[in-house]
Amino acid sequence: MSVVPHESHSEEEELPAWSLPAEAVDRIRVPVALPDQVTREWAWGGSTGAGVRVCILDSGVELGHPLVGAIARSVAVLRREDGELEVVEDEEGDLCGHGTACAGIVRSLAPECELASVRVLGAGYTGGGETMLAGLRWAIEQGFQVVNMSLSTTRTKYVERLHELADRAYFRRVLLVASAHNMPVESFPWRFASVISVGSHEEPDPFTFFYNPSPPVEFFARGLDLDVAWLGGSTLRCTGNSFATPHVAGICALVLGKHPELTPFQLKSVLYQTATNAGGER
Amino acid sequence: MSDLEAAVAAGVLGADEAHRSLLQATVEVARAIFGAKAASVFLLDEVADELVFEAVAGEGAGELVGMRFPSGTGIAGWVLTTAEPLVVDDLSADTRFSRGAAESTGYVPKSIMAVPLLVEERALGVLEVLDRPPESRLKLAEVDLLGLFANQAAIALDLLQKARRAREALAGEGRLAPLARIARRLEEEERGAALELLQALEKLLR
């Protein structure tokens, strides 16, 4: 394995053209080569997720919940009086518990990652598509390495912009981990190839996850009968893909804690090679 | 009553009843399949921003239909907002579960499976199954099954809503009410000129 310092990618980087002159080959040297046999030990052995910034795009996260721990930053996407959306510091925390549950799951797998919250869902909230887009755009601009999205939209009018954001995230090394819908319906962004999509399996082990060779759902993680963090420092027994997704986000945080130079493309390969059904529990 | 009115009444009013029966059958079957204490369908009233009980099987059947709640209330409100199913097994700790609303219905459940009723891109309402047998461990296949029921209920709910809109449009001050009134007048006596005018209008709109 060879590791060289990674130069941060910038969208504004000037390129002569979309081709590779001979003298430029050295410039794109790949900083990490995956070993012949990628194991879980190689992928995240010894990692706690330290140094990795994970964003929970959801209903907010309750501050001070014992299963969640420290939250580095909490913001909310709110509509101003003039109708424009803006990202402001969040004073309310979590209004319903869903985001706190996701944060608690990530924390349980990657205890030392840095968690942030972007609130785009709330009590009685309607018209969430624009808010979700604004929150996602902000998260990408902040350069979080992992964004957990246990939500989706069925509205096709948002698809093009959402697709564009998902691709932007992919090229900027912001890994989007998105819940598949729990019903056989079209919704987004989990259907995009540039994100990591997650459905549920019935096994009780948080590190058991499966690669699905028949997408659009690419991975299955624990999503049945989980005791998750809830409001008021409590826990609640829930089921759903919403809770499977942060398991994969947490595992990604562990891998990035050990191999921060991995691109989303490489990381997805690592997930495949460490999946339970790909012999990953070596 | 004119032929047009009669036709519309037969179609629309009959449809209303048929769709209501279909909704009722769906919640009855859902309750039976899951061995649950109750099952219900809520319709979103967009104008009032409220959820309305449209069909109930088991606990509360016969009393709750027509009862309304703010659309952000409880588990149903959350499921409507996110358009995602939700299964919760210990409701004592869940703040989305509006205990006040549940108590006013006379029945406070311990567990809920709730699923949105989606037609195209919209959530029209919510299907809930309350209190499966406590000893039966939930399986993901049950969530899938509930989704299938939801599809059926969503179609019935969609038809019911369309029939109601058609009836409102044709009645009283509705947008198409003049059409119904004109049809009635045309049948009252010989109105040759008026019929010719109607035919000319039809030609014009072709």
Image: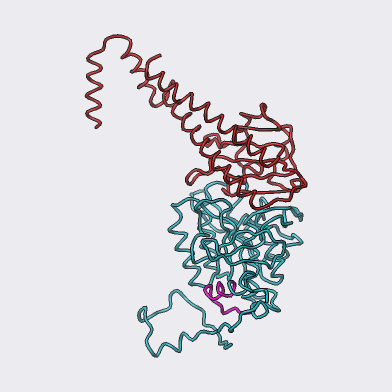
Q: Is residue A261 magenta?
A: yes
Q: Nearer the viewer, residue A122 or B188?
A: B188
Q: Nearer the viewer, residue B17 or B108?
A: B17
Q: Which chain is cyan?
A: A
Q: Is A122 on the left or on the right of B16, as rendered?
A: right
Q: Is residue A164 magenta?
A: no
Q: Quadrant of residue A76?
A: bottom right
The residue under the point 59% across, 41% down is B126
Quadrant of the frame with the N terminus of chain A: bottom right
Q: Identify the magenta region.
A: A258-271
* Magenta stretch secondary structure, dominant: helix
Residue A196, given in percent of the width and then of the height, sits at 55, 65
Q: Quadrant of residue A55?
A: bottom right
Residue A258, given in percent of the width and then of the height, sits at 64, 79
The residue under the point 69% across, 78% down is A45
Q: Give the mark count.
A: 0
Quadrant of the frame with the C terminus of chain A: bottom right
Residue B99, given in percent of the width and then of the height, sits at 73, 40
| B168, above or below B151, in the image | above
Q: Nearer the viewer, residue A77 or A186?
A: A186
The colour one sees for chain B in the rendered image is red
Q: Is A9 on the left or on the right of B80, as rendered?
A: left
